[in-house]
């Protein structure tokens, strides 16, 4: 009985530690989503007007839409 309780306690401790690590990792994301997006999608790799989303290396999801540079449009991005 005591061994079962110890295993359950260790499982809960592992879960809490994993969640805390994920939160700390997301906290290290760059503040500028547009600059961060170039890690996922280099210049001219996105279709104009088509939204894309992906997972940044910091662990947080990012969503972007490419603008038409010839018409003065810029890439817009936000953290999800």
Image: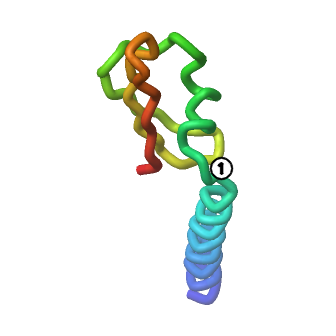
Expressed as whole percent of the image width and height from the top left, the position of residue 15 reads 57, 68
Residue 66 figure quarter: top left
Instruction: State the residue at coordinates (41%, 50%).
Output: 80
Is residue 4 positioned above or below 27 on the image?
Answer: below
Residue 71 figure quarter: top left
Expressed as whole percent of the image width and height from the top left, the position of residue 3 reads 64, 81
Q: Secondary structure at mark 1?
A: loop
Crowding near the residue tagged with mark 1, few <14, some 14–19, many ≥20 C-alpha atoms within 10 Å? some
Expressed as whole percent of the image width and height from the top left, the position of residue 16 reads 59, 73
Q: Quadrant of the N terminus?
A: bottom right
Residue that numbered label 1 is attached to: 30
Q: What kind of colouring is applied to the model shown?
A: rainbow
As drawn, which residue projects farthest toward the bottom? 2
Is residue 33 positioned above or below 6 on the image?
Answer: above
Instruction: State the residue at coordinates (58%, 26%).
Output: 40
Expressed as whole percent of the image width and height from the top left, the position of residue 19 reads 57, 66
Residue 49 figure quarter: top left
Instruction: State the residue at coordinates (44%, 46%).
Output: 78
């Amino acid at each position: 009985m005591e061994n079962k309780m110890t295993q359950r306690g260790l499982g809960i401790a592992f879960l809490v530690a994993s969640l805390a690590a994920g939160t700390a990792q997301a906290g290290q994301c760059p503040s500028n989503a547009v600059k961060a997006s170039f890690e996922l999608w280099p210049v001219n790799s996105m279709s104009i007007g088509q939204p894309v989303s992906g997972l940044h290396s910091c662990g947080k999801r990012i969503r972007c839409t490419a603008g038409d540079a010839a018409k003065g449009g810029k890439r817009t991005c936000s953290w999800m």
